[in-house]
Image: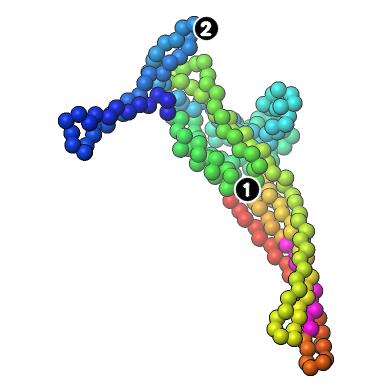
């Protein structure tokens, strides 16, 4: 943005203006004291690296982006970098990445990739960075794309308890205690499938007054629900 400028001309014009948009040349540092101006270059994506179980804490502790013991897998233009086992099927990640080899750098494709990877709901952190290579192709600069994915915990559960005490109508009271257990698996078949299972149970006592007589009625409710989401 700092290289884009506007010129507005309102001379001899009533309620009108001529607007010109210009782009300044790129200022590149060649050594400690010298800079040169040159035209902006076109950047082409050379290789795409996908780190499927990136650990930010490891990077901070060891001053390394990844462990030297990581394995790699080439799949349809992507290089998957992973530790021990590849946690996700490559085709699932591929369908959410809109950056391609030998294509011009495009911010829109980066935003789309980030959006679709987030929509899988299996990653806690998603970072997409680029590194420039020293080699060039004709007048174009080459860059490598690095996609760092930090997964969420695959399995989790939540226990919820709820109690209510209400008056349904005059002379009638309702007390209910309910609880539920929710289990979630975020990568059931290694394809970012999301499984939600919930078991619910409730016990209630409803008291109805008839004159001076109180008639209590007990109620029991239970249920099970499961949903499977496939990207």
* Mark 2 closeness class: few <14, some 14–19, many ≥20 residues within 10 Å: few
Viewport quadrant of the N terminus: top left
In front: label 2 or label 1: 2
* Mark 1 closeness class: few <14, some 14–19, many ≥20 residues within 10 Å: some
Tell me the residue that label 1 is attached to: 121
Q: Nearer the viewer, residue 45 or 62?
A: 62
Per the rendering, the mark at residue 150 is none
Residue at 48% x, 9% y: name it: 30
Residue at 21% x, 38% y: name it: 15
> Can you give x and y, in whole percent of width and height, for residue 187 in the image?
68, 48
> Can you give x and y, in whole percent of width and height, for residue 143 in the image?
51, 24
Magenta stretch, residue numbers: 198-207
Tell me the residue that label 2 is attached to: 32
Question: Residue 199 lies in magenta, yes or no?
Answer: yes
Q: Please determine whether, in this image, residue 50 is positioned above or below residue 175.
A: above
Label 1 SS: loop
Q: Distance of mark 2 from mark 1, alpha carbons?
A: 46 Å
Question: Residue 213 lies in magenta, yes or no?
Answer: no
> Can you give x and y, in whole percent of width and height, for residue 196 in the image?
69, 58
- Going by the image, does 163 lie left or right of 16? right
- Going by the image, does 15 lie left or right of 46? left
Classify residue 160 by image quadrant: bottom right
Label 2 SS: loop
| CB-based contact (under 8 Å), mark 2 and mark 1 | no
Secondary structure mainly formed by the magenta segment? strand
- The total of numbered circles placed on residues is 2
Question: Closer to the N terminus: mark 2 or mark 1?
Answer: 2
């Amino acid at each position: 943005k700092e290289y884009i400028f506007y010129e507005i001309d309102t001379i001899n014009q009533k309620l009108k203006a001529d607007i010109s948009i210009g782009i300044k040349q790129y200022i590149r540092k060649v050594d400690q004291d010298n800079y040169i101006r040159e035209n902006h270059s076109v950047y082409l994506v050379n290789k795409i690296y996908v780190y499927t179980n990136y650990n930010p804490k490891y990077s901070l502790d060891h001053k390394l982006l990844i462990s030297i013991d990581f394995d790699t897998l080439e799949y349809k233009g992507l290089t998957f970098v992973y530790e021990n086992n590849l946690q996700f099927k490559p085709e699932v990640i591929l369908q959410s990445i809109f950056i391609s080899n030998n294509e011009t750098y495009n911010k829109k494709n980066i935003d789309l990739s980030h959006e679709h990877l987030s929509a899988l709901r299996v990653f806690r952190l998603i970072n997409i960075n680029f590194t420039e290579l020293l080699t060039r192709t004709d007048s174009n600069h080459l860059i490598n794309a690095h996609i760092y994915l930090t997964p969420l915990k695959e399995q989790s559960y939540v226990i919820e308890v709820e109690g209510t005490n209400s008056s349904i109508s005059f002379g009638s009271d309702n007390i209910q205690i309910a609880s539920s257990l929710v289990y979630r698996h975020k990568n059931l078949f290694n394809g970012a499938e999301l499984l939600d299972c919930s078991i619910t149970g409730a016990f209630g006592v409803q008291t109805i007054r008839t004159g001076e007589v109180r008639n209590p009625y007990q109620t029991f409710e239970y249920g099970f629900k499961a949903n499977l989401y496939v990207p």
